Image (cartoon, rainbow, N blue to C red):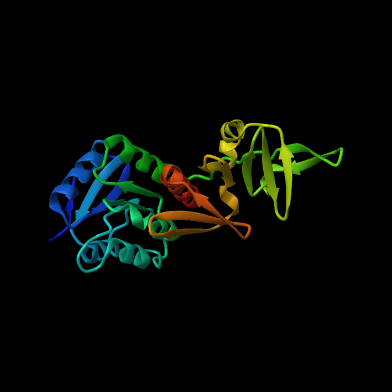
Amino acid sequence: MNPSRQPVPPSGLRVLVVDDERPALDELAYLLSRDARVGGVLTCDSATEALRLLRETEVDAVFLDISMPGLTGLEMAQVLARFRTPPPIVFVTAHEQHAVEAFELAAVDYVLKPVREDRLAEAVRRVVEGAAPAPATSDEQIAVELGGVTRFVNRRDITHVEAQGDYVRLHVGPVSHLLRAPLSQLEAEWGDAGFVRIHRSLLVALAHIDEVRMDQGRCTVVVDGAELTVSRRHTRALREMLLKRRAQP
């Protein structure tokens, strides 16, 4: 089927929607056309047709299904990664288990079907903001006690934080320090610095995550050689934070 195109306002993002199921394709195109930041919507019902279109037409983002006959969405994303200027990709799928692969392909976002309009608006926001440098966050020095001496630890060097009763343990490479503070307080205060809760007793610094592993629905992250378990409750939030960070230049 030839690609179709929605009316294009004078300005706004030009996006391409790729999905082999016509009802899902039409619904996603309609929702995107309602977003004031979107100026035009192209649609294709196969990855092969979409690649042919993208060799001739520039778009600002691709909203891509994963499970499609022939070339899958993940395979298409691998092809797009070899483009001189790859367009940002937002995966839109009913299958949550491909999130790690999407992250490895530098996807901007990973939206689960059925698609809510507010969730899609968040994906568009990530596409828009992905073109701008992330705001710099100032580093902070944390005062810790060690053998009766107060030392200062740079927050950027902390890999993860572990709750221990009324204290938290700050991990800095092979060394750790106790700090009297609730984990919930650090979660609130350090969120803008890239710390995210992965378990009721753990915060990790996104910048220090070396690997994300999925095994039969169980998610873990590797931080400075340590493999830490991500609770099911926090898996989706972690995935979205990693995708957002990966999208930032």
Residue 91, relative to residue 200: is it above or below? below
* Residue 97 falls in image quadrant: bottom left
- Say whether residue 42 is left or right of residue 74: left
Is residue 88 shown to the viewer in this render?
Answer: yes
How many circles with numbers are drawn on the protein?
Answer: 0
- Say whether residue 115 is left or right of residue 80: left
* Residue 149 falls in image quadrant: top right
Name the residue: 33% across, 52% down.
Answer: 96
- Say whether residue 1 is left or right of residue 133: left
Residue 183 pos. (x, y %):
60, 35
Residue 229 pos. (x, y %):
51, 51
Observer-nearest of 197 and 191: 197
Of all residues, the one furthest to the front in this rendering is: 165
Is residue 130 shown to the viewer in this render?
Answer: no
- Say whether residue 228 is left or right of residue 106: right
Quarter of the figure that contains the N terminus: bottom left
Of all residues, the one furthest to the right in this rendering is: 148
Residue 147 pos. (x, y %):
86, 42
Name the residue: 64% across, 35% down.
Answer: 165
Residue 33 pos. (x, y %):
23, 40
Residue 77, relative to residue 128: is it above or below? below
Name the residue: 57% across, 43% down.
Answer: 202
Name the residue: 74% across, 43% down.
Answer: 177
* Residue 114 falls in image quadrant: top left
